[in-house]
Image (cartoon, rainbow, N blue to C red):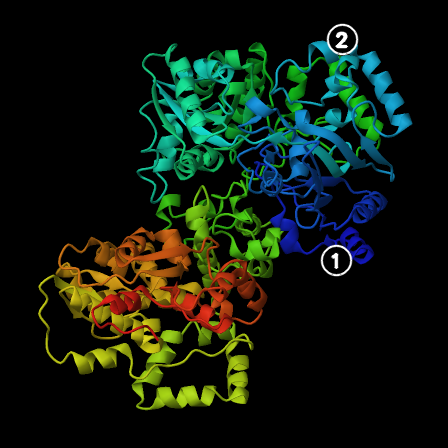
Amino acid sequence: MSDHAHRLAAALPGVFRTDLTTRTAYSSDASIFRQVPVAVAEPRSTEDLTRILELTAAEGLPLTMRGGGTSIAGNAVGTGVLVDTSRHLTRIKSIDPDSRTAVVEPGVVLDDLRAAAGRHGLTFGPDPSSHSRCTMGGMIGNNACGSHSVAWGITSANVEAVRMLLPGGRELAAGPGTSGDAAVDAELTALRDAHLGPLRTELGRFSRQVAGYGLHHLLPENGFDVAKALVGAEGTVGLVTEATVRLVPVPGARALAVLGFEDVYTAAELAPFAAAAGALTVEGMASDLLTALRLQPGRADAGSNLPPGGGWLYCEVGGDTAAEARDAAHALAEVVRERAPGMTSVVVDDPKEMRALWWIREAGSGIVTRLPDGSEAWPGWEDSAVPAGRLAGYLRDLYGLMGEHGLRGVPYGHFGEGCLHLRLDFDLQEPKGLAVYRSFMTDAARLVMSHGGSVAGEHGDGRARSELLKEMYSPELLGAFRAFKNTFDPDGVLNPGVIVDPAPLDADLRPGPGRDALKITPVHALARDGGSFAAAVHRCVGVGACRNLDTGSMCPSFKVTRDEVHSTRGRARVLAEMLRGETIKDGFRSEEALEALDLCLSCKACANDCPVNVDMATYKAEFLHRHYAGRFRPMAHYSMGWLPLWSRLVASVPGAARTANAVLSVDRVASLVKRAGGIEPRREMIRFASPTLRDWFRKTHQGPKPGRAGTVVLWPDTFTNYHAPETGQAAVEVLEALGYRVLIPPGRVCCGLTWHSTGQLTVTRQVLRRTLDILRPALDAGLPIVGLEPSCTVMLRDEAPELLPDEPYAERLAGSTVTLAELVAAHEGDWPFEKLDLPAIAQVHCHQEAKGSYDPDLAVLERLGVDPDVIGAGCCGLAGNFGFETGHWEVSQGCAERELYPKVRAADDDELVLADGFSCRTQIAQGTDNRGVHLAEVLRRALPGGKKPR
């Protein structure tokens, strides 16, 4: 730790974080730039911000503000103090429905404001695709826009007033007509009057021209609106402490018209007509985006709900009623069709269908980081903009320029306002590639200017485009920009290198030369990443979908702690720094990386929810495998990682299960065992079953039973066999009632889950190989392997081929494994089950949600008359060994308290609590007075004379 860091941490404890884990987690935002800060500050009040400014100045350090860290231009990275407002400065101070305004702190997430305003029939108009995690302070910093700005304006049009702290302790209260400081007003007036010409002719030419400072708002005809002039300053002139923003009425109903065209150029040509027809959004994308999306795991049929075409426009319209909105959408489609008779279209007004279509467009910023052939694509020339009527010509010329430089990319964006998003396959790790990057960026700046456009149309200038402002503006206007910054920040301590005195656009690149000094051959195949652990880690480009607090399943620990280190992105940044070897120098022995991964639940939600399928659970297993190679592991890795062995040993001794349960029920003994085994002391010990599922099956199935529906192999996972055999017994009865002959594999089969989750990958592979040897006859016979435990099913389906890529039987096993729900839902024979007609709560196992589907379960439950309320918060919080390990209790319980516990506690007596995962049922049993039941138990109950689950 540097002397700076020591002094900062001592001066303001609890606010400054100076540990290397935190600093490397903040080393980048969603851009291609990287700088490791000296310290990260998490202020809780305006007083904290004032003190941070004082201490930073005293240390002679620069200061950079950060919200959600979702900007793509490199506006939120810095070498000094990085101030994160998103964790604590999150109050919506007031909402006034009459004046249609809200007063917010800078860390307020946009979706939180929209939800609060929505209770009054209002919303904040600008809505970038990162709306679930971007902050109001970040939006003000970048002058963010989003899909609805075509109707409701960009951020500057929706800001009424701004409170701001300046270096030296001054505070401004800026609004129309004043900055709140007479001396500042005088300086700004003089600046404006000295540059009236360029302010009037070079700025404010079209809605998406956000490059540079918005000095045109200071013009007399624009009301000398200082607040609006400060929007888009990217943290270079002051620290926003509070903002008053304008709200707009929300339509009573909405409908979405998706219009399909021959190609993206035609879509661009017709976008202005859709905007003029009253659309609330006019979003465009090309077929390349769809191709890239369909290459993602499990998304081969994505976009099947789109109309035919090679380019599309998403045109949302509103109305007082659903019928009015639907009619308006059809009318808009006809207006455009008059100019493009070959246009195709689809109109939807069902919220679920609209959300499914919007997801394709909004996931673009993540999806296009990988081109269809798997190569990496990077931001830089990310959000250029031209007047909407010139977009088609600009897009054609831009493709031509890409071809001249040998570059590829996938365009999409806000076509109704002429704003284009584009990531390109720059080779940023080689000098030649860096030269191409610089040359292209310069040429592209000149190209966009030839079309009357702007180098930045949404994300600000940042480190990506500030150097290019000289291509766009006159020396006189650039001098006015410098004078504007000097008015507020004369010493240049706020976000240096951005807008004024720009940093080189090819400096401090995260994917630059030397990013992967540490190279390994991973145990997992990592086929999608060419077998490269580094390429897998670098899948994370920083769009921050893992920071969604109220939607999606990832990242459970971040949703509880709101700590960037505990986000998937934060962990990926720490691993990337470990691979680089500059700040984290001890490779896989790194304690910093271990700390960042400690609260990863290995739930695999990121493998599904992340737009680029970052799979942190796999990366964690790879890291632990190497971190503890040849070293003593935590006791939890021996006690719980080797649970299959200990369970088998207990079961092998007659009476041992009952004895173990009795001994472990003694508090003092249980306490000693938990302490020795690295188990959380507040956890109840799991119990050993007697008889096991195998023992029961052996006694009750002395001879083969006929199977008119065929033969299946029931997978005897460790949890079902040794700890919850009632689930397996129910499954056997259900399968036999359906007419199947049930077999249980002989020998010691295991999927290796507990070894895998603790990073003991050598043992995992050995266990899987032995299992494949035992299963070979069943696999040769083509028998289905029916899994009851979702996490073990995922091991058989997904992890076995990854861990044994050269073993053909691993692929066979993956293809043969089915869940009980899948088998029952597809069953075409007799249906022996009666209707239950019961309400239910369903906790979907996180692995099933991430790597499978709950649809077959829902189909079966519907036939049973069970209507489940499916919990949407993701992982239950136990996550196998995670919730049992010392130090994880608070996060484990916090995950469950988000939705699972409250709903279970409120359940009626006759309401089923569905949970196929042993971990989920254990969490429910230990955290509530209820118990969860497996689908097998529900199906058995529905058999004639079936017994109620215990």
| Residue found 32% across the figure and 67% down from its top | 766
Image-based side of 491 in relation to 877, left or right: right
| Residue 326 percent location from the top left of the image | 41, 26
* Residue indicated by mark 2: 197
Residue 142 image-quadrant placement: top right
Q: Is residue 185 visible?
A: yes
**How dense is the environment of label 1, judged by Cα within 10 Å: few (below 14), some, or many (20 and up)?**
few
Disc 1 element: loop
- Asked if residue 671 is positioned above or below residue 161 in the image, the reply reads below
- Asked if residue 455 is positioned above or below residue 783 in the image, the reply reads above
- Asked if residue 65 is positioned above or below residue 859 in the image, the reply reads above
Spatial distance from mark 1 to mark 2, Cα to Cα? Answer: 49 Å
Q: Is residue 409 visible?
A: no
* Residue indicated by mark 1: 14
Amino acid residing under circle 1: Gly
Seen from the viewer's position, the closer of residues 247 and 848 is 247
